[in-house]
Amino acid sequence: MAQLKAVFCDVGGPIYDDENFVAAVLVALDELRAADGMPPTDRTAFRMLYDRSRAAQGMSLRAALAERFLGSTARRDELHARTREHWAHPKGTLYPDVIPFLRALRGRATVGVLANQEEGVVRALERDGVAPLVDVWAVSAIVGHEKPSPELFRWALAQAGAEPGEAVHIGNRLDTDVRPAQALGLATVWVLRGEAPDDPTRSSSPSPTWPCAAWTASHPGCSS
Ligand SMILES: [Mg+2]
């Protein structure tokens, strides 16, 4: 990398616990099932499907959940809409390494969130003291583009005034973070938590620039 000008960060996984999304999907599934006279979602079966999706890093979790628990993949959009109503980032679910990391970047690079999230994520990041450390808000619900579309990445790069080769994207998924960012020429950090697989293998990895479980405050590399 010639010069690091911009650091972009996914939200679910790197910043907030992905279990916030899981909780919202489960409430949505239970509500939709109750409306059809069905009992609550089997948590064990849900977790098996969710873990399979994490291991695959590419399958449509929404479609698989709709088929398994609502009877048809055609209900995926209905499930998505209901999930959005319940998706929030409660106090206490911010990872403790986020603020020290972003503080260390202050004055060294433009920082952006780059995430498929609802607008409410801005208020959560304000509440948790992260917002003052963010310069660029590439939030899908606000910008109108979703990862893995290159449009959201290009929008963030333009806002930051950076070329792809001067930027790094930090995310926890291969399909919506590492692969699309690499395709555009950004460096990548694959944060192995939340929706990332428990056991990433050489074959599942597209060789992110820095695969890691967390990052240090001194540079966007790895602490483990
Ligand atoms: Mg994520």
Image (cartoon, helix red, strand yellow):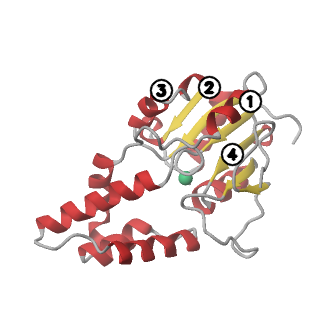
Label 2, label 1: how many angstroms apart (C-alpha)? 9 Å
Give the residue displayed 50% in from the left and 50% down from the top.
Answer: 17
Quarter of the picture containing the C terminus is: bottom right
**Dot in front, 4 or 2:** 2
Foreground mark, 4 or 1? Answer: 1
Where does the image place residue 138, in percent across and percent down from the top left?
54, 36
Query: Residue 169 got which mark?
Result: 4
Write down the residue under mark 1.
105
Image quarter of the N terminus: top right
Kind of residue sitting beneath label 2: Leu
Find out whether the residues at labels 2 and 1 contact each other: C-beta distance under 8 Å: yes
Q: Which is nearer the N-term, disc 2 or disc 3? A: 3
Q: Residues within 10 Å of mark 3 (few under 14, many from 20)?
A: few
Q: CA distance from mark 1 to mark 3?
A: 18 Å
Q: Is residue 112 left or right of residue 84?
A: right
Name which of mark 4 and mark 1 comes first in the sequence: 1
Q: Mark 1 is on which residue type?
A: Leu
Residue 119 seen from this side: no
Residue holding disc 3: 126
Badge count: 4
Q: Earlier in the sequence, mark 3 or mark 4?
A: 3
Quarter of the image for residue 142 reads top left
Q: Position of residue 103 (x, y in %)?
A: 69, 27
- Disc 2 from disc 3: Cα separation: 10 Å
Residue that appears at 75% across and 37% down: 217
Element type at marker 3? helix
**Residue annotated with mark 2:** 133
Q: Residue at x 27, y 71 (%)?
A: 41
- Considering only vertical position in the picture, is 35 above or below 86? below
Q: Mark 4 belongs to which amino acid?
A: His
Q: Residue at x 60, y 28 (%)?
A: 134
